[in-house]
């Protein structure tokens, strides 16, 4: 267990993993999901405001009911034993984040369009 990790080192941790797991009860900001998915991790996360808005269940990750640790362990074992599915979810999550959350191609143009409309 590493505890707090500085932003400069987050990518290193994500690159060492294959699966991202979070059973966070309250997560209104999707940043950690986007970071993990951008690094090609298959996400298994508890349903909450943030995860529900970013994860497409069984496509870009897996959503688990709050506190359902039995389903969490089953899903982790399933992905470990089924490398094809793990790789498919990993690819899908990376593509999804690239299409929807890339700063240069998606986010900045959206902000610029909003600014143009306001001016």
Image: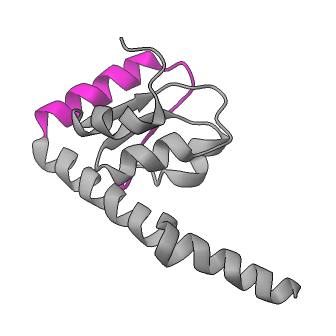
Relative placement, left or right, of 49 versus 47 is: right
Q: Position of residue 52 (x, y in %)?
A: 58, 47
Q: Where on the picture, by quarter, is residue 25?
A: top right
Q: Position of residue 13 (x, y in %)?
A: 30, 31
Location of residue 33 with respect to 66 vertically, above or below: below
Relative placement, left or right, of 31 versus 79 is: right
Q: Position of residue 46 (x, y in %)?
A: 52, 31
Q: Where on the picture, by quarter, is residue 31?
A: top right
- Region in magenta: 58-82
How many marks the image carries: the answer is 0
- Nearer to me, 21 or 78: 21
Q: Quadrant of the N terminus?
A: top left
Location of residue 38 with respect to 64 vertically, above or below: below
Q: Position of residue 67 (x, y in %)?
A: 54, 18
Q: Quadrant of the C terminus?
A: bottom right
Name the residue located 54 percent from the left edge and 30 percent from the top edge: 65
Location of residue 119 with respect to 16 vertically, above or below: below
Outermost residue on the right side: it is 119
Name the residue located 25 percent from the left edge and 58 percent from the top edge: 91
Relative placement, left or right, of 5 versus 119 is: left
- Nearer to me, 74 or 29: 29
- Nearer to me, 57 or 118: 118
Q: Is residue 77 inside the magenta stretch?
A: yes
Q: Where on the picture, by quarter, is residue 74?
A: top left
Q: Is residue 78 inside the magenta stretch?
A: yes
Name the residue located 43 percent from the left edge and 17 percent from the top edge: 69
Name the residue located 50 percent from the left edge and 64 percent from the top edge: 101
């Amino acid at each position: 267990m590493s505890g707090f990790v500085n932003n400069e080192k987050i990518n290193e941790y994500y690159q060492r993993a294959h699966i991202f797991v979070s059973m966070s009860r309250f997560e209104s900001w999707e940043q950690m999901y986007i970071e993990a998915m951008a690094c090609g991790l298959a996400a298994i996360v508890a349903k909450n405001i943030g995860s529900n808005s970013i994860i497409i269940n069984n496509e870009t990750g897996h959503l688990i009911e709050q506190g359902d640790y039995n389903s969490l362990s089953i899903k982790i074992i399933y992905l470990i034993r089924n490398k094809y599915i793990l790789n498919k979810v990993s690819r899908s999550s990376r593509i999804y984040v690239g299409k929807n959350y890339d700063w240069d191609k998606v986010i900045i143009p959206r902000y610029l369009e909003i600014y143009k409309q306001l001016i």
